[in-house]
Amino acid sequence: MPKSLSADIKNDIKSALLAGKDSMDVASRLGVTYATVNNYANKFFPNRQRGLGGRPMVVSAQTKRFIKIQVVQGQLKTAREVHDKLMELGYSISYKTAINILKSTDFFVAINVKKPLLTAKHMKRRLAWAKKYQNWTTDDWQRVVFSDKQKSTFGDLTDVSNTGQDQGTLLSLSISS
């Protein structure tokens, strides 16, 4: 069984923590371990606020709000522009830090996905397809198989082949029950 601390040391721990001293400083000053001070701190103050760990932020909260406003207004559109603006304001930070600042203000940086351009012909074909099937019910769509292969049956032979130009065509199935 571990030895218990004297009432004087317990009171010293309590008063030092109430005064806002750091647990590590209290432990070294009183000659006890850091864990002991933390255990008693949890016992004396179960709802105490703990400091956030990690390195302090380089950019102030005010600057973050300024950057957020500029992004919302559309004056800064890319992470590179945000980085350049922060450098202009006197912050010597990396591009990655600028991205982290954007993330901390609930903006997420992503590379745009490249998509093929739709020509007028593509748009007309898509519209025609949508209009052709706009009145289909859920039951109609359950009978459809989307495939780039076509299955043909000739007697006992079954041939599965690519349809070439007709890739991605609708194959309608007739299901008898």
Image (cartoon, rainbow, N blue to C red):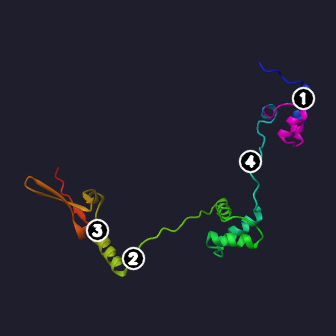
Counting residues from the N terminus, which is met first, the one under dot 3 or under dot 2?
A: 2
Q: Which residue is mark 1?
A: 9
Residue, disc 4:
53
Q: Residue at x 24, y 57 (%)?
A: 143
Residue receiving disc 2: 118
State which mark lies toward you, 4 or 3. 4
Q: Earlier in the sequence, mark 1 or mark 2?
A: 1
State which region is magenta.
16-35
Instruction: Identify whether 42 is placed above or below 5.
Output: below
Q: Looking at numbered disc 4 in the image, what kind of residue is underneath it?
A: Gly
Q: Secondary structure at mark 3?
A: loop
* Mark 2, other Cα within 10 Å: few <14 / some 14–19 / many ≥20: few
Q: CA distance from mark 3 to mark 2?
A: 21 Å
Q: Secondary structure at mark 1?
A: helix
**Disc number placed over residue 133 in the picture, else none:** 3
Mark 1: amino acid: Ile
- Going by the numbered disc 2, the residue's amino acid type is Leu
Question: Distance of mark 1 from mark 2, alpha carbons?
Answer: 76 Å
Mark 2 vs 4, N-terminal side: 4
**Magenta span includes 21:** yes
Report if the CB atoms under discs 3 and 2 are less than 8 Å apart.
no
| Residue drawn at (41%, 73%) of the image | 116
Q: Residue 85: where, in percent of width, then height?
A: 71, 72
For the residue carrying disc 3, how many other residues have a C-alpha within 10 Å: few (<14), some (14-19), or many (20+)?
few
Q: Position of residue 60 (x, y in %)?
A: 77, 62
In the image: residue 143, left or right of residue 78: left
Instruction: Say what amino acid the circle numbered 3 marks.
Output: Tyr
